[in-house]
Image: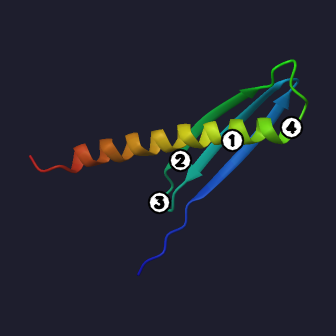
Amino acid sequence: METKQWSVRIDISESGKDTHVHAVLVTMNGTVLKGQGHARRHPRDRAVPEIGDELAAGRALIDLGSRLVQLATADMAESAPL
């Protein structure tokens, strides 16, 4: 059984009530995919940075996952027999 390892880097930046996340996936063959996520704290909510981090990171990973599925779909179409 072959084991592969892909790395995902999550970069989180906060500015006031906004949290932005960049998720970057690097596969073993060097393919790089990027996802973005954003969260904004409502003015009446308590300032709990972890919540914004979690929401923005989750959204970035969902975006990254969608892009990965799109890539796989395109690869399948290219490799389909004529």
Q: Nearer the viewer, residue 49 or 13?
A: 49
Q: Quadrant of residue 62?
A: top right
- The residue wearing badge 1 is 57
Q: Say which amino acid is labelled 1.
A: Ala
Q: Amino acid at mark 3?
A: Asn
Q: Secondary structure at mark 1?
A: helix
Write down the residue under mark 2: 32
Name the element at disc 4: helix
Across and down, in percent, residue 61 comes to: 59, 43
Quick one: quadrant of the N terminus? bottom left
Tags 3 and 2 in contact by the CB under 8 Å rule? no
Which callout, 1 or 3, points at the residue further toward the start of the chain?
Answer: 3
- How far from the left and from the top, in percent, is residue 70? 39, 40
Q: Tell me which corner region of the image, top left, top right, bottom left or bottom right, holds residue 77.
A: top left
Which is more N-terminal, label 4 or label 1? 4
Q: Residues within 10 Å of mark 4 (few under 14, many from 20)?
A: few
- Amino acid, disc 2: Val
Find the residue positioned furthest to the right: 47
Q: Which residue is label 4 attached to? A: 49
Query: What amino acid is at disc 4?
Result: Pro
| Colour convention | rainbow
At x 65%, y 33%, the residue is 37
Q: Residue 81 at x, y = what percent?
A: 12, 50
As drawn, 75 above or below 28: above
